[in-house]
Structure formats: structure tokens, C-alpha cells
Amino acid sequence: MPNRLPIKDIVSGLVTSMARAVRYWFHYTLVAFAWLGVVPLTACRIYRCLFTGSVSSLLTLPLDMLSTENLASDCFQGCLVVTCTLCGFISLVWLREQILHGGGPDWLEQLGNNNNGNNQNRNGGVAPGAFNNLNLIGGLAGGVGANVGGVNANVAQQPAENVGAEDPVGPAMEAEDVGIEDVDNANNAAAQDDNNWNPIEWDRAAEELTWERLLGLDGSLVFLEHVFWVVSLNTLFILVFAFCPYHVGHFALVGAKMDIMVTATHFEGLLTTLAGYLVIAVFLLLIYSLCSLTRLRKGQRIFGLCYVVVKVKLLVVMEIGAFPLICGWWLDICSLSMFDASLSDRQASFLSSPGTSMFIHWLVGMVYVFYFASFILLTREVLRPGVLWFLRNLNDPEFNPIQEMIHLCVFRHFRRFIASVVIFGSAVLLMLWLPIKVIRMVFPGFLPYRVVVSSEAPVSELSLELLLLQVVLPSLLEAGHSRAMLKKLVEGWSKATAWLLDLRSYLIGDVSLDGEDASNIVDNPEQDMPADPRDNQAGQALPPAQQDLNEGLGAAHQAMLQGGGPTGFQPYKRPSFFVARISALIFLMCVTFFLASTISLVLPVFIGRQLMWLWVGDTKIHELYTAGCGLYICWLCLRVSTVVAGWYLQGWAIIKARLKLWGMLVVKSLVMAGVLLVVIPLLLGLLFDVIIVAPMRVPLDQSPIFFPWQDWALGVLHMKILTAVIMMGPQWWLKRAIERVYNDGMRNLNMRFIMSQICLPVSTCLGLALAVPYVIAYSIVPALGVNFETQTFVVRRIYPFVLTMIMCCAILVFQVRQFRRLYNHIKDDKYLVGQRLVNYIHHATSHDRTPGADTAG
């Protein structure tokens, strides 16, 4: 192998690499153009064409596809359309799996059982696999045939001695029997194939289709076929699931003379489509009833299944869309006086931006529902199993809301919806509206909250926003300690209330029932809840149990039939005057919620206002910052009190040892925090200011003004971002040092290591980055005798110039390394085959040359 490559080899290698890069660039550009340009643009313009409502739009659709107007906006809207259709397709597939594995509703299951029963009556026995052949999705077209196949299988399983018996009818009938037997064998074979068909085996074809091959990232052009199918299926989904329901709803609303009312809501398209789905559901029920009257079993199953799909879709919209939206608007209405607002203000806000207003209220409602459900789950961990029987347990592994939507009737879902609205709305009245009224009466000047968008000191407000986001909210939202403290409070209140009302056995359930009178012990959950006449309505028999399924699915099905009742129940002692005690318990619970809400609305804001007054004086600050600071102080007090209470139970010696240990940790932390949380963020924020902010915002004829407080706040944010980037990057000395400090933990802080390996190097680098350009601009440049304008230009632009030079040097070093790697790659490809050198002759001296040296290589 030569020491240096010929120029021709280097040039050819460079040309080959460039050709490969150009080919890859062309292929990936085509992939990006197809998936990010053709697919969303086609979806958007087909969607717009279908909903324009004119025939001319259909005629001009090919020309609209090639139009170059509004490409960016159309692509963005097309991405939203494709995302919606993709989510719809995934939801349909998932719903198919839910129905396939969990079964359909009872009336659809009974339909299959009736078919199997008819086959059994005709056959004189039980058809093998009759119930297993009830495939509500995959076997819609072949379900009946599968059952008939089961009958033929029974016919074919007759005893062998009957086949050769004499037939008094004659040879002609024997020949006819032979023909019938051939037909039966053919039907039996087809039915056997249907019985052996496994829908899961269809997933093997999808195993070969990877994401790289689907999107075209493997270098092949097969993805163009996938693009065609995506465009076609997307168009089909838009036509079936959006276009048809919209126009059905439009005709229904026009016929009912409600179109003007729907138009006034500013959400005509959504409401019209939902109305169309309601009309389609009603028509599907009517068609199902007609099929049942005419005994068209296959039609019953098809239209019944379509009705289930539409019903689940509407129920999901009601539960996830309408319910949080109602909660959000009710929260807003009940808190109007807290912000000195009125309904006319909310109406004006809604008319100015309907979509944004509805989304914000929906988001607030979702947050409220989430925290309400989280509190119920926490309460279940404290109370006796069976106390909250009227609320569904979301932690129950057998709880499946989609299965409930499939199996339960619409009336029961509507009744649950109304009950949920009443419960959540009453909680808002009790914990928000009533405390606000009381606060305005007791503390007249405390409300309303100041919710100004900007204050008189924007620098301080920006710093407060960063402080709130980086310090306060992470501490308040830390799940472990906050949840543990709240659980302790709930447990303490429950025990105190149970002791006061003598309901320890009922509320907590930690009282032994041995020796108690059996008449006072409730060991049946049916005694705790009213009778539910919903099950087994109209005397209908429940479908037979599926013997081939596991117990978990059967238990889930039974739990769904019980209407989401309690999954666990613990017996308890029923004291005298039980109803009065329960009424007193509910009254105490309402009073507790009212007092807790009142304190939460007053105490944090009051503490925060006092702290902000000490900090910024009489400047008006957004109440979000005052409430955040007040909540943080309250959280710190509760946290310290719980820690001290835990130490107090262990004795004074443990308290002294812990105080000594934590005192040393506090001193170490304060010393290191002075560098890590003050010096380094200040240097980093100031460096960012002189490199990015000042050159972009301040002209050359003006002097920039630096705010250390704002630079420090921005530096904290930048330090967190850089730390996350370093931890995700490759291994180097700073990442190894940070990982070691993280692994050591708070109690094993090594102050010397942190100061020498992290604080000193980082502070030195940042200080040099600030000091060296400053010295050059203010010492060396004036010594060269340049004019004042040039000096000002150098002072203002030297920091971006130095950063640009460093980046150029880094890019140059990177390119040199890449060229060296390419050079070695070309040399290895030309002269190295495996581990053997080729085309190499060692030019040795004549006295060292041997006869075999000429043949070497």
C-alpha cells in the first residue's frame, strides 16, 4: 500500500462520494416532497373540493391540485386532515380489536346464539365451535357459513358402520346420495378452512413492512405505491366519515329548521357532522329493526355492528369533548366575580375568537376532571373498600370504558353523564362560587385578583415568569411529596371524623368485627346500594358464559353487566342512627371542602402579595406570581413540618444528629449554590445578552443597558437547557462530572470535586469568553489608532465575530476529519481486500532483494 494516494484516485473517490450524496439527496427530497407535500396538499384540496358544495369545484379539481397558491397553508391544513383520518383509522382498528376480543353488545351476542341454536335444533346436537365462530368483525360475511359448516361437520361425523348399510330406496338414490355427499364434503372443507382461519396470521404480512420501507427511507421507490394508497384511503375516509355525515346532518337540520341556530354557534361544521351521525345512528337502528322483522340475520349483524361503531364514536365525543367543555364553562361562570368580569366580557371574547375560547375552556375542564379523578383515587387508598361504591374505580384493571360504551345502552350512558355533570358542578359551587361570595363579604378589598397581562416593570415580570416556571412549579407539581402530604391530610381527617361520629368501621374499616352482633354487620354490598332494575330488562336471558375464555375476561364482562359497581367490599359494623351519622358525615365533608377552598384562595395570595410588596414595592404584579410564591412558601412550611414531625418521633438524639448532618449539607449547598446558581447563570445570561440580544435589538448609535437580574433569570433557563443537552450528548469530561454528582446524591455531596471539576472550569471558560473580547475591544483596538466609529463598531460586534470565528474553526476541523476519513476509506477500498494487501511492490535495495521479493504482493 503506498504512503500517498494518486490525485486521480482521490478525485475519483470524491466524485463517487459526491454522486452517492447527490443520489441520496434526490431520493430523500423525493420522499419529503411526497409525504410532506403531495399527501397533505392532496388531502387539503380534496377536502376543500368536497365541502365547497359546487359542481365546478369537482370539475376544476385536477387544476387545483397543480395550483401553487397558498402552498404552505394548504400543506399545514392537509397535515391536520391526514392526522385526523389517521387517528380515525387507528381508532376503528382498535375498536375492532375491542369488539373482537371483548364481544359485542348483548343483543348482538344473542343474535349469534340464536343462529347457533337453530343450527343445533336442525342438527340434533351442539355444533362444534359454534360460539367461537361468532366473529363480529372478521366473520360478518362468513359467520353463517361457518355455522352451516359446523352442521355439515356433524353430519360427516356419523358412525362408520352406517355408511355401508343397505338402502331400500335403490341405486338411483345411492347415486344422488353420492352427489350430495360430494357437495357436503366441499362445504365441509370450506367450513374447515373458515374454522382454521386465524385473523392474527394476517399480521405476518405487516411484519415485513417496516417504517423505513413504508416511508421510503430504505432507498427504494416502493413508497410511491404507499403514497398512492394513502391518498386513496384518505380520500375514502373523508368521503365516508366526513362528507356523508355532514350532508346528512345538513339536510336533517334544514328539514327541522335548525340550520340558522347551528350557524349562530360559530361551529356549524362540527355540529352539523355530529347531527349527521345521530341521524345515521337512528337510521341504522331502523334498518336493524327491519332486518329483524324479515329475519335477515346477516343484515342484522352488519347494521347492528355499524350502529355500535357510531354509538361509541358519539359517546367518546360526549365524554371527552362535551363533558370537560361543560366543566370549563361552569368553572369560568362561577369564578367571574373573582376576576371582576361579567358574562358580556366572556361573550365578547368568544365572538372575537370562538375556537381559542372553546379550546381554553375545554383544557381547563380537562385539568379539573383530571385532578378531581386523582383525588378520588387517593381517597380510595384511605377509605374502606366499598365506601365509594357509587363512583367508578379508574384503577381497577378490569375497568374498560370502551367496553362499557360497547355493551351498555345509550340511556345508561346518558344517565351517568347527567350524574357526573351534577356531581362535578356541585363541587364547583361548593369549592369555588360559595368561597368567593364569602371572601367578598368578609374581606371586601381582597378580591378581585389582578390578572393584568403586563406590569409596569417588564424586566421583573419576565424574571418572575422564569422563576415561577423553573423553581415554583416543579416543586409544587412534584408528585411524590405533594401526594404523600395530601394523603396524610385525608387520612387524618377521615380518622378524626370517624372517631367523632363513631363510623370507624364504616369509614376506615380497621376495626375487628369479632364478637359483634351479626344483625349489625353488613357483609353484602347489595345492602349499601339501591336495587338496580337495569340488568336483565324485559325478562331477557343473559347470553351463555363463554367457556373457552379466561376468567379475567369473564369477570370483566360480569363487572360491566353490574354497571361499574365496586370490585371490592369489606364488611363493616352498622351503628345506631346510621342515616343521621352519614348525613352528618356529608355535612362535615362539605364544610371541610368549603374551608379548604377558602384557605387556598386567601392564604397563598396574601403571603405572595406581602413578599412581592417587599420585593417590588407598589408595582402591580400578576396574581399568578403572588399565588405561586405563596403556594411555594406554604409547601416549604408543610414539608419542613412533616420532616420535623418524623424526627420528633425518633427522639432528641436522632434530631440532633439529623440537624448536624443537614446543617453541614445546607452550608455546603449554600457555598456551591453561590457559584452554580448565581455566578454561572449570571455569566451565561450576560454572554447570551452580548452575543445575541444586544446586537439584534440595540442600534450602533445607542448604548445597550444590561439588567443583571434579567440576565441571571435567562441564565438559569439556559443552564438547564445546556445541562440537558450535555446529558444527552456524547461522553466527555463535563458529562462524566455531572453524572458522578447526580449518582452521589444530596447526602454525599463532594464539595471539593464539584468546585474543582465543574464550577472552576465552567466559570473560567465563561469568564474568558467575556473578558478576552472586552480586552481586545477596549485595549488593543484603541492602541491601533482607529477612529471612534470603528472602535464603537468593534465593541458592539466583537462578541458575535468571535463566536462566528469559533464556529468556523469547528466546522473546518470537522471537515478536515471527514476528509481524512474519506481519504482512508478510498485507500482501503482500492488497496485492501479483507486483510491482504494488493498492488504493492516493495522497492528495496539490490543487496536486500531476494528472488521471491519480485513476486511479493
Image (cartoon, rainbow, N blue to C red):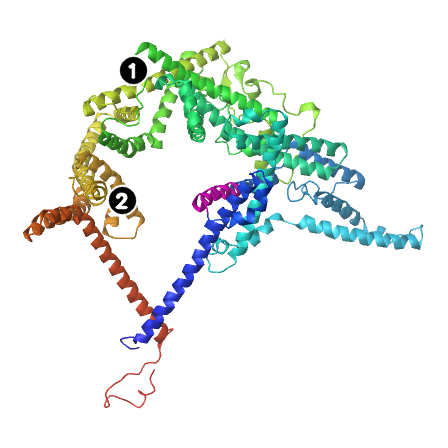
Residue sitting nearer the eye, 386 or 594: 594
In the picture, the quarter occupied by the N terminus is: bottom left
**Nearest to the observer: residue 336 or residue 383:** 336
Give me the residue at 45% from left, 44% from top. 70
- Give the labeled residue for mark 2: 723
Tell whether 123 sits left or right of 496: right
**Label 1: few (<14), some or many (≥20) within 10 Å?**
some
Please give left or right for residue 292 compared with residue 473 in the image.
right
Q: Position of residue 794 (x, y in %)?
A: 14, 49
Image coordinates for residue 368, horizontal then vertical, percent: 42, 26
Name the residue beneath numbered marker 1: 446
- Up-down: is 536 above or below 109? above
- Tell me which numbered mark, 1 or 2, is placed earlier along the sequence: 1
Alpha-carbon distance for marks 1 and 2?
42 Å
Across and down, in percent, residue 119 comes to 77, 40
Amino acid type of the residue that numbered disc 1 sits on in the rendered structure: Phe
Is residue 524 visible in the rendered image? The answer is no
Question: In this orientation, which residue lies closer to the viewer: 464 or 427?
Answer: 464
Q: Secondary structure at mark 2?
A: helix
Residue located at (24% from left, 54% from top): 807
Which residues lie in the magenta part?
A: 69-86
